[in-house]
Amino acid sequence: MLRHSHIAHLIQQGVNESVIKLMMWGTIDSKMFATDAHLTGSDIVPEINKLYGIS
């Protein structure tokens, strides 16, 4: 559970997927990213707002 939360937090902070894979599994070829990255539809709006500088 802690790893799932940490990965979701890293994604929300804008950390690149390859960096997260290397940090968590030691390889950028890991297939576990899709399993452990628990994001929902509610994560979309804040991310797009951040992209366009909307607070």
Image (cartoon, rainbow, N blue to C red):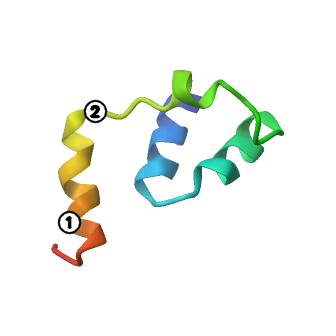
Residue 6 against residue 16 in the figure, above or below: above
Residue 19 against residue 7 in the figure, above or below: below
Residue 25 against residue 35 in the figure, above or below: below
Tell me: 33 left or right of 52: right
Query: From this viewpoint, is residue 1 visible?
Result: no
Residue 12 is situated, as x and y percent measured from the top left of the image, at 40, 52
Q: CA distance from mark 2 to mark 1?
A: 16 Å
Tell me: 48 left or right of 30: left
Q: How many marks?
A: 2
Lower sequence index among marks 2 and 1: 2
Q: Which residue is mark 2?
A: 40
Tell me: 23 left or right of 54: right
**Which of the pair 5/16 is nearer the observer?**
16
Q: Residues within 10 Å of mark 1 (few under 14, many from 20)?
A: few
Residue occupying the point 47% across, 60% down: 14
Residue 44 is situated, as x and y percent measured from the top left of the image, at 24, 47
The kind of residue on which mark 1 rests is Asn
Residue 4 is situated, as x and y percent measured from the top left of the image, at 52, 29
Q: Which mark is residue 49?
A: 1
Query: From this viewpoint, is residue 18 visible?
Result: yes
**Which of the pair 28/20 is nearer the observer?**
28
Residue 32 is situated, as x and y percent measured from the top left of the image, at 64, 24
Residue occupying the point 58% across, 56% down: 16
